[in-house]
Image (cartoon, coloured by chain):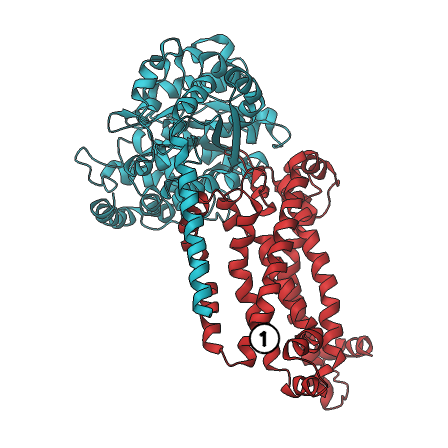
Amino acid sequence: MQHRHAARIAALMAAALGMGTLAACSGDDGESTTLNVTLANHVWTDIITEKIPEFEEQSGLDVVVTQLSEDQLVDNYKVKLNAGSADVDVMMYRPLQVGKLFGQNGYFADITDRVSGAGDWDWEDFQAGPVGLTTYEDQVVGVPMITESEMLYYRTDLLEDAGLEVPTTMAELEEAARTIHEENPGTAGIVMRSQASAAVTQLSGFLYSFGGTWLDDQGHSAIASDEAKEAYAYYGRLLHDYGPDQISTDMSWPESAAIFAQGDAGFWIDASSLYENVYDPAKSQVGDQVGFAPFPAGPDGSRPYNVAAWALGINAASQNQDNAWAFIQWATSPDMTLEIQTEGVPSARTSVWENPEGTESFPEDLAAAIAANGENGVGQDRPLVVGVAEAREIVGAPIVAAITGEDSDQAAEQANEQFEAFLESDG
Amino acid sequence: MSTAQTASAAPAGTGVRPARRRRAPRAKAYSAFRATMIAVVVLVFVVPLLWMVMASFKTNVDIQNTAKTFSFTPILDNYRHVLANDDYLGFVRNSFVVAFLATGISLLLGVPAAYSMSRFNMHKSALVVLLARIIPGVSLLVPWYYVFANLGLVGGYGVLVISHMFILIPISVYIMMSFFDSMPRELEDAALVDGLTPIGAFLRILLRLSVPGMATAAILSFIFSWNNFMFALVLSGANTKTLPVAVFDFVSYASIDWGAIMAATCIMTLPIIVVALLAQKYIVSGLTAGATKG
């Protein structure tokens, strides 16, 4: 009796599953008029979601937006795309963090023909660095829409009191941090990220400026080179000697930005996209005393990262790719990009940066620093591998060693071995 | 009494030792130890909550300012900001719907199951039920998503309720099973002698007596469902988002609105406290009733 019941229930469930599969397949014939767009919490998203009704009117489509914070977004994609879901059409993603992984897994639709055949929309207008990041094995898989670069933030009042010029080299930066630290008890000369994984992106500018790289030309680990060791040691020394007292080694940007915004540090080095956190008086006590400068030069010049922070791609399993492309084209058109950049979101379009209207919303020195970083910038801020999260933990370890005053050269050698092993197995 | 003792003990270190009764120092040491431990535990549990409540009344600049930890000008802007977001009350409703349905259905299925497992010696089957609680939830997400997406259920309340029930049924079965185990069989035997059917005995006698157990199971289930983040993250849709996922709306790529997060979290915590307080009454009254003394 019980067995018969169980069998009946199993049959029912199987039938339900089968119907579900059929229902899902029936979308093949024609594209749905509902477009599922998944976006990250970002100022860009706030602006675009306000304008989506305009797009819906133009296109006759019904746009459903799912909005999540960065980490949740990635988890969400991993589950959905892994299951081959067609519930995601347009996807906002971080090319640096997941580009290679998603590309390798075949999650992205190839949009090479779409971007190059789009005429006035003008694919050529996009900066080369960001475009390189949204290209996977010669196929364009994403349209970069937000960029960021590594910026030197400083306190105009503290520099003035100490009679200091804005530092343009690593040596000057160290000297200035030392002076501010000595002359203002309780104030740190400089604050930066100190947590291993989080600090990797900020170390990258130091690494490049000292002449180092994450990987050599053959794709082997290069983090034990003399240049890399110098970069690790320098980064750590700044924080160990002139950083906040009793520095913790678990600071990412919210913590380091908070210290700077409280007026407790002379310099802060982090992404340009974060400037509102220390510049906006609603968030910062020192908003009107913040200056912006290009990344200081090391032995190899000023070489900060300048990257595509976010891009829009199309899910390879989407049944609605034409409409998805229509949405991306609308959201990244020259006019829309200009409009969004005037609200403070740095774009990847050259024409917008050349247009005076495009930079007038930024503080003048910030716009100038972003432009300078754009010229010198390197198109990546972390090792571009499949398992980025694990790689960051490995290459970030020597940073922590340097900050805590341990032997960072030895830590770099150790990390080098681990990184090499990682590259051989998972990289 | 104790204050007088403390006062008289104060000059002890100066050399003049007052004569004391033998037991007093030990009792005093014990009570001091007890007070310290209570203070430590209370601090550990209450300080984060207190910080959360205080931060919800501060500006983002003040939250980061350690000098203004306790002395600050309270503002209501964070609450205004959260409540002005039309969606937020919708998320509160979503959380309630999912938590009530999941808890209710789990009890409905779990209590009779626990009864039969307890009375008919099916403790091995109970282990299988527990297995559901042992498997890490995250390993279920991909297959669930696949199945539910194909059924077209993803984004609805149903799928959230089902996924929560997967955890809640083992919770209620296990709590109720040990509860039924501890109930004397004589109660049922007496009911049968008085002319009730076995089901009647269960419904009219045992169920009435097991209210405290059910209240415990209900509270734990409700709290789990209310706080569940992982299942809701993947299986909910834009209109069925629950509170734990919605709180992250205030975390943006390049800015974090701590004030709003704290206000949103306070709003989210309040119902749980109310539910726990209300249900606690049943637990206490159930325990003191002494129904099983027979």
Three-letter amino acid code of the residue under disc 1 = Tyr
A93, above or below B270, in the image:
above
Residue A97, image quadrant: top left
Query: Which chain, by letter, is cyan?
Result: A
- Circle 1 residue: B115
Instruction: Answer with left or right where residue B73 lies relative to residue A191.
Output: right
Instruction: Answer with left or right where residue B228 lies relative to residue A240.
Output: right
Instruction: Identify the image quadrant of the C terminus of chain B.
Output: bottom right
Residue B12, image quadrant: bottom right
Name the spot of residue B260 as percent of width and height, x first. 64, 39
Instruction: Answer with left or right where residue A126 lies relative to residue A366.
Output: left
A52, above or below A202, in the image:
above
Q: To which chain does the residue with label 1 belong?
A: B
A260, above or below A371, in the image:
below
Instruction: Identify the image quadrant of the N terminus of chain B.
Output: bottom right
Name the spot of residue A351 as percent of width and height, x first. 41, 10
B198, above or below A353, in the image:
below
Residue at disc 1, secondary structure? helix
Name the spot of residue A13 as percent of width and height, x first. 44, 54
Query: Which chain, by letter, is red?
Result: B
Residue A301, image quadrant: top left
| Residue furthest out toward the bottom | B22
The reply to whether residue A237 is visible in this rendering is: no
Who is closer to the viewer here, B293 or A295? B293
The reply to whether residue A178 is visible in this rendering is: yes
